[in-house]
Image (cartoon, rainbow, N blue to C red):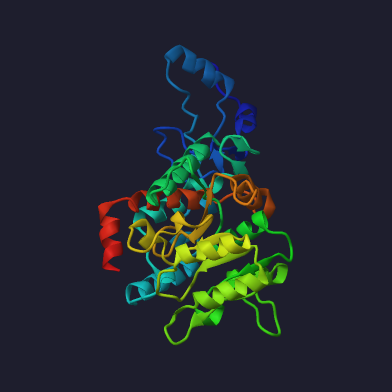
Amino acid sequence: MQACSGAAMMGSVQQPMRVNRPAFPLKGSGVSGFPHQIKLNSVKPCRAQLEGSLVTGRPPSSVSVPVLESSFVDHGLSEADPEVRAIISKEKERQFKSLELIASENFTSRAVMEAVGSCLTNKYSEGLPGKRYYGGNEYIDELEILCQKRAVAAFHLDEKKWGVNVQPLSGSPANFEVYTAILNPHDRIMGLDLPHGGHLSHGFMTPKRRVSGASIYFESMPYRLDESTGLVDYVMLEKTATLFRPKLIIAGASAYPRDFDYSRMRKIADAVGAFLMMDMAHISGLVAASVAADPFEYCDIVTTTTHKSLRGPRGGMIFFKKDPVLGVDLESAINNAVFPGLQGGPHNHTIGGLAVCLKHAQSQEFKAYQNSV
């Protein structure tokens, strides 16, 4: 049998080469990790060895098994970045040792965190299901449609009458996307005054400064509480709305522990030709469990965050009536305001976590939890 010459041996030595791995390891490969490049170190067999292997049926002895050289993306957090790992550990301990009594500091579930920390974060998907600008979104479409259906079901809505956009990045962006959808610059809005329990995104401003985007781009007039009762002063709200003629009246608050009188606010909005919107961010879990009053019976649009009493990931949702309101197709206007109006690709890992929490929101366990609140 021909022996391998020194020249053949010298020519057979290969430098480490880089090859692209598939997005996930092949089934049964036993290799874990996310997409990255790996080094394959191997020695090329000479011709004599290859010919010999054909006779014997055995692989040439000089062929080595590829050796995977790990890279940064292979490492767990403790190995890749111990500083960040240490900070997370300290924050976790702080949370476990604290008793938080406000909705925005609520805990989510392990299942939600698993979805948020999944491979869904790798996929870009501008657009809506069936109308994407990137390929390979068939499973993302499936996920988002599932999330939409669960959102409608969790709040006991008729899917023929109500739609939902689950792509907003959080509550304030969701609110501004609504304003963008139904208002023109300098249109008038009314929301509960911040010092009386309202929220920044509802148009708060001071005598010296327009604080939020809502007050910068729109003309804002707050309504307030009757300080003798601690309740919304609906009489003054009606008088002010009659004079101010807002195009949008906003119910909802960040520090108001009472139900809003949606029926009365509906009448005021109708009298002045305004849309009625509810921001239920802090109480959405209570609404889903039918513990708090239902805003959907009277409002045209309902927005919410997803991480407070709903116990989901940090995101937002916009619910809208499917029938036109004041001549506006809310579904088209809101979807276009979200993308391409104010956002690009949605955070699919967040939508995955939201779908998980909305399934839980329909359970008896969740209802019992909300009743205990």
Q: Which of 215 and 258 lies nearest the eye of the viewer?
A: 258
User: Eyeballing the image, is 121 above or below 45?
Assistant: below
Return the residue found at the far right. 185
Viewport quadrant of the C terminus: bottom left
Return the residue found at the far top. 55
Residue drawn at (35%, 58%) of the image: 109
- Across and down, in percent, residue 169 comes to 56, 57
User: Eyeballing the image, is 216 above or below 358?
Assistant: below
Residue 12 left/right relative to 93: right
User: Eyeballing the image, is 181 above or below 90?
Assistant: above
Q: Which of 305 and 199 lies nearest the eye of the viewer?
A: 199
Residue drawn at (65%, 66%) of the image: 246
Q: Which of 372 and 235 lies nearest the eye of the viewer?
A: 235
- Across and down, in percent, residue 207 comes to 69, 85
Q: Is residue 338 visible?
A: yes
- Across and down, in percent, residue 229 comes to 42, 83
Residue 26 left/right relative to 363: right
Q: Is residue 70 visible?
A: no
Tally of numbered tags: 0
- Across and down, in percent, residue 62 comes to 50, 29
- The quadrant holding residue 250 is bottom right
User: Eyeballing the image, is 261 above or below 228?
Assistant: above
Residue drawn at (45%, 42%) of the image: 159
